[in-house]
Amino acid sequence: MIRVRLRAMYLGRCQFSLSSPGGGKGELWGSPMTRRRILLVAAGARFASFLPKAAATEAAMADAIRAVIGESEAQRGKVELELPPIVENGNTVPLAVSVDSPMTEADHVESIHIFNQKNPQPYVAAFKLGPRTGKARVATRIRLADSQRVVAIARLSDGSYWSDSVDVIVTLAACTEQ
Amino acid sequence: MARVLINLPSHAKPGEIIEIKTLIAHPMETGYRLDSTGAAISRDIINHFVCSYNGDEIFRAELFLAIAANPFIAFFTTATESGELVFSWTDDHGQTQTEVRQITVE
C-alpha cells in the first residue's frame, strides 16, 4: 500500500492522505507527468472523481463579476470592504461592507455582491437592500482557502456599480478536519 | 430545528436605525470534503436568508459555499412601527426555518 497525497478540495495548502493499491510514492502535483505519476493520478481518481472540481481563478472571478454587472463598469469608491489584512484562520473570517449612501427612496443601495479569487467558487454572497434598510452596511463571516483578493461590488438605485477590494493573507487556510 | 441567535433591540424610537444580528447553527457543508472512509460528504448549505418587517421584505441574502459554518449575518433597518420581524433561512434541501421577534416602536 502506498500513500497518495491529493491536493484537491477546498484549499491550496491543506492536504489529505488516502491509501490506494499499487506501488511507488509520489506527489501528484508540482512536477512533470511521468508514467508512474499518470498511474497514480488514475488510482487517485478512483477516490477523487466524485468530488466537485475545485477550481477558481482570476478569470472565474472576472466571469462571475461580469455575470452580475453585465456590460457596465464598476467604479472605485463609495464602497468600503472591511477584512483583516492578515487572517489566522481561514475557516471564519469577519467581513463587513459599507456603502456611502443616504438610503432614501431616490438614492439607495440595491445590492451588494462579494467575490473571491481563489476559493473553489468565486461567488461568496449577494445581499439585497432597499430604502428600508436604513444604513448600507452588512456584516458576515466567510471562508478563505488561500491568500487572495476579495472584491465587493454595490449596485446603486441609479444603476451604477461601485467596488472595493482587499488583499488578504491567510496563514491557516479554510481546511477540512479529517 | 437548528439553534438560532437573533439580536435586536426590543424597543426603538420611530425612524431610529437599528442593527439586527442573526446567527444560525449549520455546518455549511461545501461538498469538497471527504469523510474518514474517503467518501465525499454531500453539499448542504443555507443558500437563502430573508427578513421581513410586518410583511414587507427589508433584507435578503443569497449565500454560497464561501460563507463560514454557522452563518452570521448582520444588517440594519429603520424602525417604523411596532410589530414583528420574521427571519427565515432556507437550505439546499428546501427546508426553511422561520423565527419571529417582536419590536415596540414608540
Image: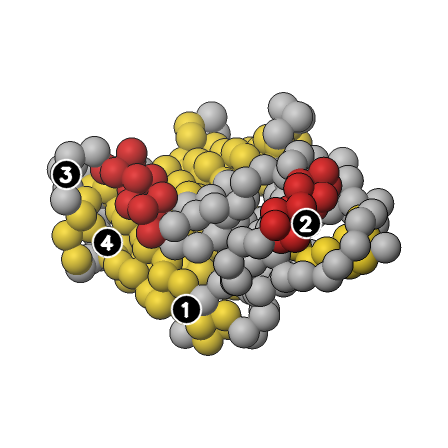
Amino acid marked by disc 1: Val
Left or right of residue B105: residue A10: right
In space, the residues marked 2 and 3 are separated at their CA atoms by 46 Å
On whether disc 1 and disc 2 are found on a single subunit, the reply is yes
Q: Earlier in the sequence, mark 1 or mark 3?
A: 3
User: Going 29% across and 34% down the picture, which residue do you hit?
Assistant: A67
On residue A168, the disc is: 1
In space, the residues marked 2 and 4 are separated at their CA atoms by 44 Å
Give the residue at mark 4.
A163
**Could you say which is closer to the camera, residue B85 or residue A96?**
A96
Q: Is residue B72 above or below residue B47?
A: below
On whether disc 1 and disc 3 are found on a single subunit, the reply is yes
Pointer 2 chain: A
Left or right of residue B11: residue A21: right
**Which dot, 2 or 4, sits closer to the camera?**
2
Q: Residues within 10 Å of mark 4 (few under 14, many from 20)?
A: many
Give the residue at mark 2.
A40
Pointer 4 chain: A
* Residue A152 in sight here: yes
Q: Earlier in the sequence, mark 1 or mark 4?
A: 4
Q: Position of residue A114 (x, y in %)?
A: 37, 49
On whether disc 2 and disc 3 are found on a single subunit, the reply is yes
Amino acid marked by disc 2: Leu
Quadrant of residue B58 in the image?
A: top left
User: Going 72% across and 56% down the picture, which residue do you hit?
Assistant: A4
Say how many tags the image has: 4
Please tell me whether mark 4 sits on a helix, a strand or a loop: strand
On residue A57, the disc is: none
Give the residue at mark 3.
A72
Q: Earlier in the sequence, mark 2 or mark 4?
A: 2
